[in-house]
Image (cartoon, grey):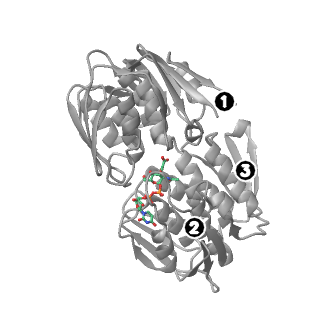
């Protein structure tokens, strides 16, 4: 298994191109199941999770081709011949549940394995199922699979999500595009990935209003056509790389970055003493002198501070001046990076969903291990701020969500290399 070796660094300078969003692409790809005409996605990220979603779609009979070194995905679902999403693929990636709504909406039946728990929390899919039931789906759970039927087709309805869920909003939104009549989704997620999905569905002929607000109204149509759609910038990759100069000093321009994708995060960087400026190519981030200031962070659904940047922000706070309190409100077990950061000399006290971090002058390199994607990259960031060498193991987590991390950071002056394992 590969490892990443990071050596403590001086200032970083240069440009980092930001890829298309993994989490947008993982919901845009299943949208192909809604139409028998081709869907082309440009600006797709080259990640192992995208390969897993391709494999899932192919297992259903969808054709998927990768062009331009994987940055363009051409998909066609004109000959779907299987409506069963198998456990062997679904267990590898929870986003697999997103094939349920589209398959059910188009063909009136689908069988999808339940994803099961994961490292950051229990992550049930009950809201996905309840939203589909509100559109008339008949669901039965048998032997770990959801058997879904809508013999006369889905029907529009009103559903209010009891808690904001990105994935359940996406599943319901896709399904509603082909339901008869009007569907209203209340307390819907407002993430940029939802707006990107709605944009793509509109290009395919869907009638959607209100995406980006907490109430989305969808007028069902008979059929959807093909489209070409560019995947929105990955705001989490963007935030991660914005933290690199914040941790090491220097000035880095993140190409393709936009403040509107990360408003709450940028406010916290500002409070910590990091300069963020908009340029015509993206966002420039600079830390000119002195230690960063400690800031408190609470994770929330968009437009709040994203849970997917909590681990990386913790890495920054480990060397800040003062004490910061990080509250994780989305997932119940998302502090597994904390004990690893402590092995590098960080002072962190975790009590339930709250981590109190007292900044230290300098971290110390150590071999570390992470159990999820964002935790892994937080350890790389911490390694950049540490004295000596940090070896990050279990790099396969990283490859799920960051393309060519060592190249992107290496190009701005980071001492980072990948070592192939046996
Ligand atoms: C998406 O997961 C992202 N994944 C996650 O990205 C991200 O952390 C999360 O949204 C929150 O922003 C993708 O887009 C593929 P949720 P999702 O449904 O949709 C509870 C990363 O690192 N809930 O918004 O699964 C749930 O347990 C990751 O890239 C239910 O109770 O998240 C959680 O506490 C990991 N029942 C909360 O809602 C449900 O049916 C929000 O989860 C669904 C969710």
According to the picture, the residue beneath numbered tag 1 turns out to be: 421
Q: CA distance from mark 2 to mark 3?
A: 27 Å
According to the picture, the residue beneath numbered tag 3 turns out to be: 74
| Nearer the observer, 258 or 82 | 82
Near mark 2 (Cα within 10 A), the count class, few <14, some 14-19 or many ≥20, is many
Residue pictured at 50% horizontal, 21% vertical:
6
| Nearer the observer, 415 or 151 | 415
Ligand 1 located in image quadrant: bottom left
Q: Secondary structure at mark 3?
A: strand
Q: Judge from the rendering whether residue 357 lies leftward or rightward of residue 89; answer left or right.
A: left
Q: Residue furthest bottom?
A: 152
Residue pictured at 48% horizontal, 51% vertical:
119
According to the picture, the residue beneath numbered tag 2 turns out to be: 114
| Nearer the observer, 295 or 192 | 295
Cβ(mark 1) to ligand 1 < 8 Å?
no
Q: Judge from the rendering whether residue 363 lies leftward or rightward of residue 26; answer left or right.
A: left
Residue pictured at 37% horizontal, 42% vertical:
310
Q: Judge from the rendering whether residue 291 lies leftward or rightward of residue 75; answer left or right.
A: left
Residue pictured at 66% horizontal, 29% vertical:
421
Residue 243 figure quarter:
top left
Near mark 1 (Cα within 10 A), the count class, few <14, some 14-19 or many ≥20, is few
**Residue 94 drawn above or below residue 181:** above
Query: Which is more N-terminal, label 2 or label 1?
Result: 2
Horizontal and vertical percent position of residue 35 = 69, 65
Q: CA distance from mark 1 to mark 2?
A: 32 Å
Query: Which is more N-terminal, label 1 or label 3?
Result: 3
Mark closer to the observer (1, 2): 1
Query: Which is more N-terminal, label 3 or label 2?
Result: 3
Location of the C terminus (image quadrant): top right
Cβ(mark 3) to ligand 1 < 8 Å?
no
């Amino acid at each position: 298994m590969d490892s990443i070796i990071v050596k403590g660094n001086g200032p970083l300078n240069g440009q980092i191109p930001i890829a298309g969003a993994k989490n947008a692409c993982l919901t845009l790809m299943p949208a192909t199941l809604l139409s028998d005409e081709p869907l082309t996605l440009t600006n797709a990220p080259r990640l192992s999770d995208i390969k897993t979603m391709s494999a899932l779609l192919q297992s259903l009979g969808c054709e998927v081709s990768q062009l331009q070194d994987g940055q363009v995905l051409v998909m066609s679902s004109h000959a779907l011949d299987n409506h069963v999403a198998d456990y062997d693929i679904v267990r590898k990636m929870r986003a697999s549940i997103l094939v349920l709504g589209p398959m059910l909406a188009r063909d009136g039946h689908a069988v999808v394995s339940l994803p099961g728990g994961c490292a950051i929390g229990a992550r049930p899919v009950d809201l996905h199922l309840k939203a589909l039931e509100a559109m008339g789906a008949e669901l039965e759970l048998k032997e770990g699979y959801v058997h879904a039927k809508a013999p006369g087709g889905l029907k529009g309805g009103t559903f209010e999500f009891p808690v904001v869920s990105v994935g359940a909003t996406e599943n319901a939104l896709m399904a509603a595009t082909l339901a008869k009549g009007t569907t209203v989704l209340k307390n819907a997620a407002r993430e940029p990935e939802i707006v990107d999905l709605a944009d793509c569905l509109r290009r395919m002929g869907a009638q959607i209003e209100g995406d980006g607000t907490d109430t989305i109204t969808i007028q069902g149509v008979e059929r959807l056509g093909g489209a070409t759609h560019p995947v929105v910038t990955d705001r989490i990759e963007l935030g991660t790389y914005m933290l690199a100069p914040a941790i090491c000093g220097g000035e880095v321009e993140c190409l393709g970055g936009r403040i509107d994708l990360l408003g709450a995060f940028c406010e916290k960087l500002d409070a910590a003493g990091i300069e963020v400026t908009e340029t015509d190519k993206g966002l420039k981030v600079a830390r000119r002198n002195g230690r960063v200031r400690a800031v408190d962070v609470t994770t929330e659904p968009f437009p709040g501070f994203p849970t997917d940047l909590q681990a990386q922000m913790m890495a920054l706070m480990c060397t800040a001046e003062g004490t910061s309190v990080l509250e994780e409100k989305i997932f119940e077990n998302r502090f597994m990076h904390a004990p690893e950061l402590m092995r590098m000399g960080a002072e962190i006290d975790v009590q339930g969903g709250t981590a109190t971090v007292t900044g230290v002058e300098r971290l110390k390199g150590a071999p570390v291990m992470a159990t999820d994607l964002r935790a892994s990259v937080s350890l790389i960031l911490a390694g950049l701020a540490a004295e000596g060498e940090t070896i990050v193991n279990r790099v396969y987590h990283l490859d799920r969500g960051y393309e060519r991390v060592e190249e992107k950071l290496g190009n701005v002056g980071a001492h980072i290399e990948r070592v192939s394992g046996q």
